[in-house]
Image (spheres, grey):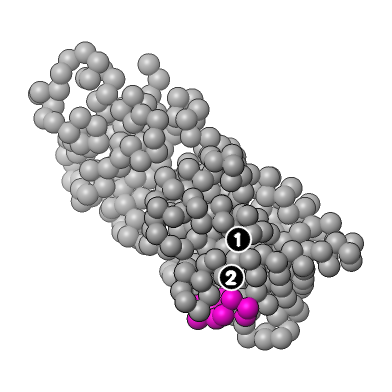
Amino acid sequence: MDRFNVTYRLFADTETEASDFATAIALENTVEIPRDVVPSGYIEDVVLGKVESVETEADKTWLARISYHIDAAGAELPQLLNVMFGNASILKGVKLVEFSFNDDVRSLFPGARFGAAGLRQLIGKKSGGFVCPVIKPQGSSAEELAELCYQTALAGADIIKEDHGLSNQKNALFKDRIPLCAEAVAKANAQRRANGDSSQAIYLPNIGGHGDEVEDLAFYAKEHGAQGLLLIPGLFGFDAMQRLARNDGFGLPIMAHPSFAGPFVLSEDTGYSHGCYLGDLMRLAGADISVFPNYGGRFGFSKEQCLEIVSACKSDTGIGKAILPSPGGGMSIERLPEMYDTYGDDCVYLVGGSLLRYGAKIGDAIKQMSAALNSSA
């Protein structure tokens, strides 16, 4: 029977210790009982995780590949994640660095609805990087935020992304600001079309509210003119994002934000590798765009870690369609040429707070961004 593989980096002094550790993980993630009492037959042969290999990676680190059967995971994403890295994530000295899914898993979890190619078609942008201003700051009124949406969309922005800090605060309640901002972007798009622009800006509001309101709020946003949404899976859960991505009635692109993700990736010997969490897992859960902190910004990711994320987003071997990586976090227009040299066309380039320095000339800033990110310009 076919099984899917998960690779872990183990921290151990000897190969024997690493092999014993891998065996413990295979038990912990599936049957969670001592090896000597695992029932023979179906449970031992199918349900129990199996250590396929343990190889030296570096001094006192080992790569252990463990296979699992879809029967242990079932058809729901939470249990699949539980099998891959449930109790094992609580152990010290183990980091999930890669997973490779077979057709059983891929048939149940198709990934992004749009992906990189679908978003390019939706926006109508044939080439070049995607210009994405971040609408902020928290504390602004709905009218002020809508005006920023209008000015940036009119100047040629591709994706109008709300800041992840805009939730449901009294200054700009979710249900108050979405109609205003969506109308502002629609007005700008109409003017662009009248001026011969065949592309459009899409408006992605940030989902706020309670966990049980995610679907209702997403449909509210759609009904009031949003062309997609921003969601924080670290707060609302990967399954909430996946359920929306697979909901044919919703059918809009989803941008995933990395807030709350730090504990999952920053430790050297626990959690996930950067590419696995911010690339592979986002694809698995149906994100079309994955936001991550760019190197040289205020969050300390290295260039190597960022390229690992980008590779996971774009890889032909990942779940479903390739998706768009989206670096941000303290970026400026001056850095865009360097970023474009690093990431190329299929990337969403975020610039937020630094745009506000342009004040009434924020449209000029968007035009500068566009010039820096269009290889055919």
Q: Amino acid at mark 1?
A: Leu
Q: Position of residue 251 (x, y in %)?
A: 61, 44
Q: Which mark is residue 177?
A: 2
**Under tag 2, what secondary structure?**
helix
- The residue labelled by disc 1 is 204
Q: Quadrant of residue 264?
A: bottom left
Q: Is residue 13 visible?
A: yes
Front position in the image: 2 or 214: 214
Quadrant including the N terminus: top left
Residue drawn at 76 percent across, 79 percent down:
364
Circles 2 and 1, Cβ within 8 Å, touching? The answer is no
Q: Is residue 310 left or right of residue 333?
A: left
Q: Is residue 285 left or right of residue 270?
A: right
Q: Nearer the viewer, mark 2 or mark 1?
A: 2
Q: Is residue 355 above or below residue 280?
A: below
Q: Is residue 45 above or below residue 327?
A: above
**Under tag 1, what secondary structure?**
strand
Q: Position of residue 250 (x, y in %)?
A: 58, 46
* Magenta-highlighted residues: 136-144
Is residue 77 located in the magenta-colored stretch of the structure?
no
Residue drawn at 62 percent across, 49 percent down:
252
Q: Residues within 10 Å of mark 2 (few under 14, many from 20)?
A: many
Magenta-drawn stretch, dominant element (helix, strand or loop): loop
Q: Is residue 282 visible?
A: no
